[in-house]
Amino acid sequence: MTAPDDAPAREASYSKTDEQAILDVISRWLEREVKPQVMQMEHDDVYPYALVEQMKEFGLFGATVSERYGGLGLRASTYARIVALISEQWMSLTGIFNSHLMMAAIVEKHGTEEQREYWLPKFVTGEVRGGLALTEPDAGTDLQGIRTRAVADGDAYRIDGTKTWISNGIEGGAVALLVKTDPDAAPPRRGMSMFIAPKVDPDTARPHPGFRTGRRLEKLGYHGIDSAELIFEDYALDARRHLVGGEPGHGFYMAVGGLELGRINVAARSVGIARRALDEATAYAQTRRTFGKPIAEHQAIQLKLGEMATRTRAAELLTEDAARAYDAGERCDMEAGMAKYFASESAVSNAMEAMRIHGGYGYSREYPVERLYREAPLMCIGEGTNEMQRIVIARQLIERNPV
Ligand SMILES: Cc1cc2nc3c(=O)[nH]c(=O)nc-3n(C[C@H](O)[C@H](O)[C@H](O)COP(=O)(O)OP(=O)(O)OC[C@H]3O[C@@H](n4cnc5c(N)ncnc54)[C@H](O)[C@@H]3O)c2cc1C
């Protein structure tokens, strides 16, 4: 595999010992703080304010931002392990800092030095938290079809449009906002730009009048975290501070450039769900008895457990492989796509099988497998649907193996 020129190996600020230490701290936190309350919070669909404060203290809002700007500078492989670990307990928590980190990555990778110095320290502490606003009511997979428009007005831009499904849209304070600055560009991606769009001006603490949050969207799972519509009406932003990179026309590449890390993250979330489903099923099968013996001794259940364990391990290995390639600065679009696709389908299958192994109890809200079953399908949608994932994999396969 060759490394493209613009993808140098990522220098980890954290040593391996430090990485293990942070994993240990998070494991203890999950056991003590998250596990006892997750069932209630998830069922009530409440935002976990106290847990967010604790995640701030661990530095998770700057996990992948380099130390130069106050972040932890973690490698993708360590980050993926953290995400999988947290997702075993409650996948929603990872959504609160992940799309935020994608916004930070856009600024760190593509912003001007002035923008990096201004935004990144605020992002890493969680003082300004947020996410990524790409999707619109009429454009998700086909991002070049977005309609949100930014029109130049002196040193500023005036923005109008609506975004939907934006994670952290209500509780967060800013988004990386994909817009069209030249709606006539051909191809359309050349006329797209990215802005850092805050609700409140960090310097004056005054709300920006043109940024409004719309509905909080009701969902099957992914509870706790807010998914919202965002409405922009004559929303004025100064180009120097807010237009990422300082020049229009590069937004589409910024949006899709972060997808490799995004896909590794979704793969890691899926690994967490698949692993938890396996653990729940393995434990339950040994305690539930039918026809005079634990159901784990029935061959039909053993076949399920054997498949679930194999899928989980394969998903872990694909995710580790993609993260390792990413950390080494190697090309990993196909690897990240494979990890995301396989791990998310494994999460769905394992959640379903865990529910079946639990019999009627699996359908009860008193057992965690019911939640895993509601959470898993989102993994097949986010960061590029699994339909698109297979197309991307096939295209890469052909590109790398020309005849
Ligand atoms: C809980 C949740 C959180 C989200 N968070 C965010 C967020 O923070 N920020 C954000 O910007 N977005 C977010 N999204 C939106 C998400 O990224 C989109 O839903 C996703 O990209 C799919 O777009 P769509 O829903 O418009 O589906 P569509 O693009 O309309 O696709 C519909 C179906 O057609 C298939 N399809 C489309 N094009 C093709 C093709 N060329 N070939 C084959 N099949 C195709 C798709 O795979 C899918 O099965 C979130 C969504 C959910 C549900």
Image (cartoon, rainbow, N blue to C red):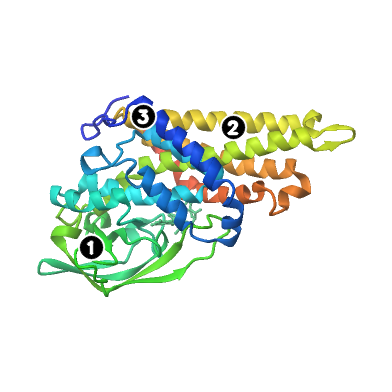
Tell me if label 1 and label 3 are in contact, CB under 8 Å: no
Nearer the observer: mark 2 or 1; the answer is 1
Tell me the CA gap for discs 2 and 1: 46 Å
Please name whichever residue, 366 or 252, is drawn nearer the observer in this view of the structure. 366
Residue type for callout 1? Pro
State left or right for residue 280 relative to residue 292: left
What number is the disc on residue 311? 2
Would the CB of label 2 be found within 8 Å of ligand 1?
no
Q: Secondary structure at mark 2?
A: helix
Tell me the residue at 22%/60% (across/down). 185
The three-letter code of the residue at mark 2 reads Arg
The residue that label 1 is drawn on is 202
Q: Is residue 98 visible?
A: no
Instruction: Please state which amino acid type lies under the numbered disc 3.
Output: Asp
Q: Residue at x 56, y 29 (%)?
A: 313
The quarter in which the C terminus is drawn is: top left
Q: Residue at x 68, y 48 (%)?
A: 367
Which is more N-terminal, label 3 or label 1? 3
Say whether disc 2 or disc 3 marks the residue closer to the N-terminus: 3
What whole-number distance in Å separates the C-alpha atoms at marks 2 and 3? 30 Å
Residue 100 as seen in the image, left or right of residue 360: left
Residue at the extreme front of the image, as rendered: 32
Task: Specify whether 45 is left or right of 22.
Answer: right
Is ligand 1 less than 8 Å from the beta carbon at label 3?
no
What residue does disc 3 label?
18
